[in-house]
Amino acid sequence: MKWSSIFSLTLVLGSLPPALCQESGLLVPSRTISLPKVQGGFNHMSVDAGRLRLFAAAPTNETVEIVDLKAAKLLRSLEGEKPAAVRYAPEFNQLYVSRGQSLFVYDGRTFDVIASIDLESNLDELQYDARAKQLYVGCMTAGKTGIAVIAIPEGKLIGKIALPDKPQGIAVEQNGSRIFANMPTLKQVAVMDRERRTLLQTWPLGDAEGNTPLGLDEAGHRLFVGTRHPAQLVVVDTATGKTIAKVDTNRDADDLFYDPEGKRIYISCGEGFVDVVEQRDADHYRMLAHVSTVAGARTSTFSGQLKRFYLGVPRRGDEPAELRVFDLGR
């Protein structure tokens, strides 16, 4: 890690109240992996905890970058049409990539293309359910917005859930049948039934705009929504759709992850911070730390198995793109 990064982190944490500083070890800088061949920045990422690999969509580069986390170096790049998102499924050892209007299924060992599906819409985020053997793909083209449902591991389109607006952020119940997705233009959260493939209802977020990232505490019946105007974490009761709590955050939230073991919510913000929020109980939350990073570094992923948080940092002039790795202190 660069000394400038350590200094910035110290400045932010050092300015916090003593009680907050004692808990600053919740996100500890571990290492920086330089990716000098990447132009621009990153979009959605995914971790293979078993094989210690990270997959990152690099849209400007028109590549998917595969990083060896143990060796801390680039393993290989998958070229093709501009990628929007990646999702790795260890249960099937498959990598899913949304590129343009097509969903690509790659073998997780050889990275050969197993299947490609033209969904006739610009695509973005991906989420999956291993038990249902289904992959959910965000469709973004006006008039075709919704969630495409793909059977995995075979890679076949089996249906679509139509939505009135572009979906951003997808969260899937593992012990229920619902899917949640943000609809930022409408300032709503869509609630869908994945078995019947229908829209059940929409939950309004009031004056909150730019609801982009989404996280789920299924056991606690709480949905975490990152909004940009105002910059907040909004906590929604998944039984009623009502807002339970709000916490002010830094601006330009793009990715959000809930750690059920640590009762922490991690939010990567393009303003140049990773915000760490504590869940004290289902109804009460507080900001623990604003970890200083780099302006524009809004894309991240989290591995509860590895107890690590990964942040994609875009190229800045002559400074190369990076993957910054943080350990979770307990």
Image (cartoon, helix red, strand yellow):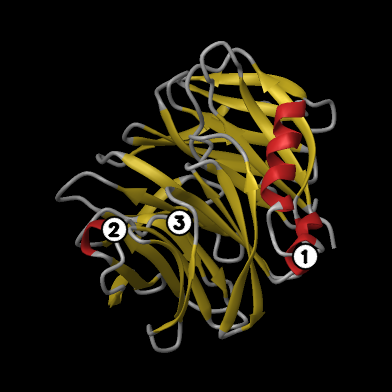
Q: What residue type is labelled 2?
A: Pro
Q: Which amino acid does label 1 sit on?
A: Pro
In this figure, which residue is indicated by the disc labeled 2? 184
Q: Quadrant of residue 227?
A: bottom left
Task: Pick whichever of labels 1 and 2 is earlier in the sequence.
Answer: 1
In this figure, which residue is indicated by the disc labeled 1? 18
- Callout 1 environment at 10 Å: few (<14), some (14 to 19), or many (20+)? few
Q: Measuring 27% from the left and 53% from the top, which residue is drawn there?
A: 166
Per the image, label 1 sits on a secondary structure element best described as: helix
Mark 1–mark 2 distance (CA, rounded to whole Å): 37 Å
Per the image, label 2 sits on a secondary structure element best described as: helix
Instruction: Check whether the beta carbons of the residues at disc 3 and disc 1 lie within 8 A of each other.
Output: no
Q: Measuring 24% from the left and 53% from the top, which residue is drawn there?
A: 145
Per the image, label 3 sits on a secondary structure element best described as: loop
In this figure, which residue is indicated by the disc labeled 3? 213
Q: Is residue 87 visible?
A: no
- Callout 2 environment at 10 Å: few (<14), some (14 to 19), or many (20+)? many
Position of 177 with respect to 262 (left or right) is left
Residue 226's x, y, as percent? 44, 61
Mark 3–mark 1 distance (CA, rounded to whole Å): 30 Å
Q: Measuring 24% from the left and 62% from the top, which residue is drawn there?
A: 163
Q: Is residue 285 above or below residue 290?
A: below
Q: Is residue 22 visible?
A: yes
Q: Name the mark nearer the viewer: 3 or 1.
A: 1
Q: Measuring 20% from the left and 50% from the top, which residue is drawn there?
A: 144
Of the pair 246 and 158, the residue shown nearer to us: 246
